[in-house]
Every structure is written in C-alpha cells, then in structure tokens.
Image: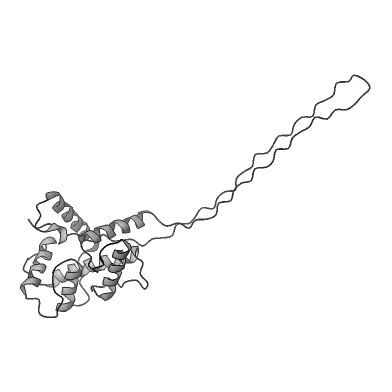
Amino acid sequence: MWCGFGKSSATFAATCLLSASIVIADTGFAAPQGSYTPQQFRAVLRGLGYTVKVTNTPLTDEETKKAIREFQTGYRLKPVDGIAGPQTQAYAANIVKILQGNLNAVVKPNPPLPRDQFYGPQTEAVVKEYQKKNQLQETGIANLALRQKLDAEAKALVGQPTTKPSPTPTAKPTAKPTTKPTTKPSPTPTATPTATPTATPTPTPTATPTATPTATPTATPTPTPTATP
C-alpha cells in the first residue's frame, strides 16, 4: 500500500511528504475534465495500488470507503471522510496524468498514452509492458515501487540527452621521407657538402563533427503520499 501505511518509519514518512509537496507545487490541482463514474474511480484506485474491486456500484461499500480514506490521509486531503469529492477526484486525476507522462517518456508506446484522468486498458497495457521489460510481475498495477523506479528512469532521461553518434575520421600519418646526403665527386680534395634533411610535417587530425543532442521530453515526478501515523 502507498508509502507503507501503518508503518512507523519517520524517515519514510518524511520522504513521502516531501515528494507530495513537490508535486503540489509543480502540478497544482487541475480539476478533471469530468466526474468519474464509480467504476472509473475504482479503476484508478486499483491501478494506483489500492485494494478494491472494480464495479459500477455506488462508492459506499466499506472496502471502497477505506481505500478512499487511505488515499485522502496519504495526500493530506481534508476532510478524511471516505467520500470521493471534487478535491479527491482532482488529485487522483493528476496522479494518473503524471504516471501516463512518465510511461510515455520511458516506455515510448506507439501511439503514446493520452494524458487524461482514466486508468483504462491502454494505461494498464503500457504498465504491463514496462513490467515485462523489467522482469516484474505483469499485473498492470502501478504500485509505489514501480512508480519510484519509473520516476528515476524518467529523471535520468531528462538529465542525459540522447546524442546521435557520428563517425570519427581517423587521421592517417604521413610517411617521413628519408633524406640521403648527396656527394659530388671531384678530383680535388674539396669537402663534400651534406644535404640538409627536410622537416617532416605532422599530420593534423580532422575535427570530429559535434553531435547535436536530441531534446528529451521532461518527466514529471509522481506524487507520493505521507504515511499514516
């Protein structure tokens, strides 16, 4: 469960709170384009690692209300009432959009995922693809461990732009000509001048063309909830 709810690790809780604060500053609370249906919101909760059954019944059963309360507590949403109100839905929508953006940056699905509020079959399929590439169990669920790994890879892509390798021309050394002293025969004992050796030019390597870095899409970190005391 997210950020180890029920654990007493103060360090882990502080890390979760810091991550959540960064995301709040970066992304704000963008309201979803439309309200979730009960089935859609349950799919989001399940996709983000909460234990709920995806049905279209009202969000009033104890299992769903418990998951919503844990979500609200983890992200310090008020009130913690187990009701999927506008603020709770908006926060959930933001998390899904960030996840989709990071999947697009790392997995590069074709076509790319639409950055919307829904944790649908397409998002689940790309999560499974990421899990398969990393030899993880293919659940289609973006739990905390997966999202942290995905975040790290997305940040690495942003920090290290991809460059196109260019062939490097190799300078060929020029052979050094050997000078032979020439003597002029003469019947008189005249000193024979010695030819001056010619200086050998140093081969100059050709400049290697500099590759132009390709712009990499900026990944947005996934918010991480705080631990429940």
Q: Main secondary structure of the magenta part?
A: loop
Residue 49 x, y percent position in the rendering: 18, 66
* Left or right of 177 in this view: 7: left
- Which residue is at 85% across, 28% downward? 183
Q: Is residue 35 visible?
A: no
Report the coloring of the rendering. one colour
* Up/down of 134 relative to 196, above or below: below
Q: Is the C terminus in the top left, top right, bottom left or bottom right quadrant? A: bottom left
Question: Where is residue 82, by image quadrant?
Answer: bottom left
* Left or right of 198 in this view: 69: left
Q: Residue furthest top?
A: 189
Q: Is residue 18 visible?
A: yes
- Which residue is at 16% across, 71% downward? 89
Question: Where is residue 56, by image quadrant?
Answer: bottom left
Which residues are the magenta region?
187-205
- Which residue is at 22% across, 57% downward? 22
* Left or right of 210 in this view: 120: left
Residue 87 x, y percent position in the rendering: 14, 69
Residue 132 x, y percent position in the rendering: 31, 65
* Left or right of 167 in this view: 69: left
Please give the count of numbered marks on the rendered protein.
0
Q: Nearer the viewer, residue 135 or 104?
A: 135
Question: Where is residue 91, by image quadrant?
Answer: bottom left
Q: Nearer the viewer, residue 18 or 102?
A: 102
Residue 1 x, y percent position in the rendering: 14, 62
Q: Residue furthest bottom?
A: 56
The reply to whether the magenta stretch includes residue 7 is: no
* Up/down of 164 relative to 114, above or below: above
